[in-house]
Image: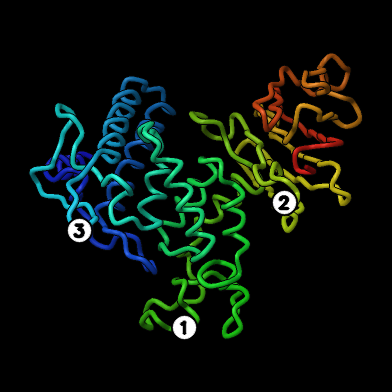
Amino acid sequence: MNFLETRKNTTGLGLMMCQFGDWNPIEVTPCHLTASLSYIHDVRRMSELASAIGNEEDATMWQRKSDFLTAEFHSSCRVVNNACHHSQTDKTDETDEPYGGFWNGSHYSTGTQMSTGAALWLGDMPDDGRKEELLKGLTADLSKRGLTGGFVFTQYMYEALVRSDRTAAAVGLLLRTSFPGFGHEIYNIYEPGSTLWESWTGDSMAQWMGESSRNHHYQTSINTFLRKYVVGLTMPPGVTGWAVVKVRPEVAGLPLSLSKEIPGASLSLDTHRGPLSLYWRRFEDGTGLKINCTLPGTSTGEIHFPATKSTIISLDHEVVWEAGSPALGGHLAKKKGLVGATFDGAFVAFSTNRGGTFVFSSSNPKAAA
């Protein structure tokens, strides 16, 4: 990290050290932006790691660096031919005001999907109206052209859409069967795949032979999106080792009309704390939803259930949420360790003080809208 910080302080983010950039994209993004995104991600990981081992002083230091770097990424650049132009005179360090970033007044860097997705994933975008305009253009472009970035892009784009409250766009992208995308790899008429490819253009041999593998880890970061947002299994920020399990199936919270092709999902993991599993499924008549999760005995949980103000949620057959309020006084709720429930407008989050098996169901979740 010291080496990367030295290089960044020599050139600024705008000319961050790089070589390959976003590998095998259809639409090339300047590698300095990709390198900057990866560097900031690494800095954030350092803060998380320091916090995990109880070193809050280092965690705060790395978080401060992340905040500064993110602000620099979002800062303005000099524009030449409608694209950012950088020189070493643009470099900044933490004693300077951020300058020499990737924002050119209407888009980031050269305006590729990767450029926009990176900015959205990083978050903390200036409150100047740019985010909504960028999201409008990005979702329209993804719907029209599909994925144009490479494997680095894939890692960030799907999560950026969910974080930006565009889960429906992410699902639409996942289910797309035309070129380019995961669906094209599986359903194209020339060489339908049963494994992921090294390149979106694997069926056309547009890449040279050495990069046309039809069985490659190139795009497997999609598994993180499937686990965290389709199945809905993750951990809250700052938690390690599944000490707290967070269940939040974002896709289950979409209107049924948008996600009827994903009626349910499941996943099981063997953790050092014990078996961890999650299964959810919509009722066939579209009027309800069931979530069945088993948490390790030494874990606690946050179980988020898609809901509207009128949703009635039961734990087994005991009502635990009704008329917009928790109802946790019953025998089963106490036995299972439900200690709280809150509503954020889209999900009811039940807190548990122990592991075990929890079976929740509803009569009119948001998914049936």
SS at circle 1: loop
Where does the image place residue 212, in percent across and percent down from the top left? 43, 78
Q: Earlier in the sequence, mark 3 or mark 2?
A: 3
Where, by quadrant of the figure, is residue 362 drawn? top right
Q: Kindly check if marks 1 and 2 are in contact, taking CB atoms under 8 A apart as contact.
A: no
Q: Residue furthest right?
A: 317
From the viewer's perspective, is 291 left or right of 163?
Answer: right
Q: Position of residue 177 (x, y in %)?
A: 61, 70
x 57%, y 59%: residue: 173
Residue bearing the label numbered 1: 204
Mark 1 or mark 3, earlier in chain:
3
Amino acid on which disc 1 is placed:
Ser
Which mark is in front, 3 or 2?
Answer: 3
Q: CA distance from mark 3 to mark 2?
A: 47 Å
Amino acid type at image mark 3:
Asn
* Quadrant including the N terminus: top left
Q: Nearer the viewer, mark 1 or mark 3?
A: 3
Q: Amino acid at mark 2?
A: Ala
The mark nearer the N terminus, 1 or 2, is 1
Q: Is residue 223 left or right of residue 70?
A: right
Label 1 crowding class (10 Å Cα cut-off): few <14, some 14-19, many 20+?
few
Q: In the picture shown, does residue 7 fall above or below 341?
A: below
Residue 265 is tagged as: 2
Residue for badge 3: 81
**Is the C-beta separation of discs 3 and 2 under 8 Å?**
no
Q: Is residue 264 above or below residue 337?
A: below
